[in-house]
Amino acid sequence: MLSEKIQAAFNRQITAELYASNLYLAMGAFLDALAYRGFGHWLRLQSDEERQHAVRIIEIVVDRGGAVEIQDLEAPGSFESPLAVFEQVVAQEQRVTRMFHELSDLAEEERDHTTLVELEWFLLEQVEEERVSGDILKKIKRVHDSPSGMLELDRELGGRPAQQEPAEAGPEA
């Protein structure tokens, strides 16, 4: 059973993941409208991934006997440029990482070892999220004044394959 504090923190994390999903979807639409379809594609896939993270946390809460309370989501707002979009993506990933660290700290305080184990995957995932979005931002900063450089980066991001959810280990109980 989850403590009330852990349950509330998981529910905040679910909301943060769903907000990121909506944010990335809106960013993708913005960049699609600028004819950066590769950027849009990358962000739509990222949106899907964030939603999958939210669902994974929902399953943890339910499996542990908790109650899921999805909170209202803030509107994503407007965007200025691909550079500004990816600066915001990196900031969002850093914010989510901090939230997972705070949840992990809370689990340690509560001596909730199961939550600590469940959070390990998310913490490692955030390392990848920050690295990948940070690399894209670095590339944009190098080429944002070069139309041909931006088109090449757009083409690169358009090649991102959709990610499959890993198969569950072992037979269904």
Image (cartoon, grey):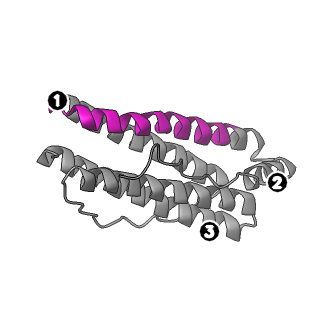
Q: Alpha-carbon neighbours of circle 3 within 10 Å: few (<14), some, or many (≥20)?
A: some
Q: In the orientation shown, which residue stands out farthest toward the bottom? A: 33
Secondary structure at numbered mark 2: helix
Secondary structure at numbered mark 3: helix
Q: Nearer the viewer, residue 104 or 149?
A: 104
Q: Position of residue 50 (x, y in %)?
A: 48, 54
Label 2 to label 3, Cα distance in Å? 17 Å
Q: Alpha-carbon neighbours of circle 1 within 10 Å: few (<14), some, or many (≥20)?
A: few
On residue 29, which mark appears? 3
Q: Which residue is mark 1?
A: 111
Q: Which residue is mark 2?
A: 151
Q: Image quarter for residue 119?
A: top left
Q: Nearer the viewer, residue 13 or 1?
A: 1
Is residue 36 something one can see in this rendering?
no
Bounds of the magenta span?
Answer: 110-138
Given the image, on which type of amino acid does mark 1 rest?
Arg
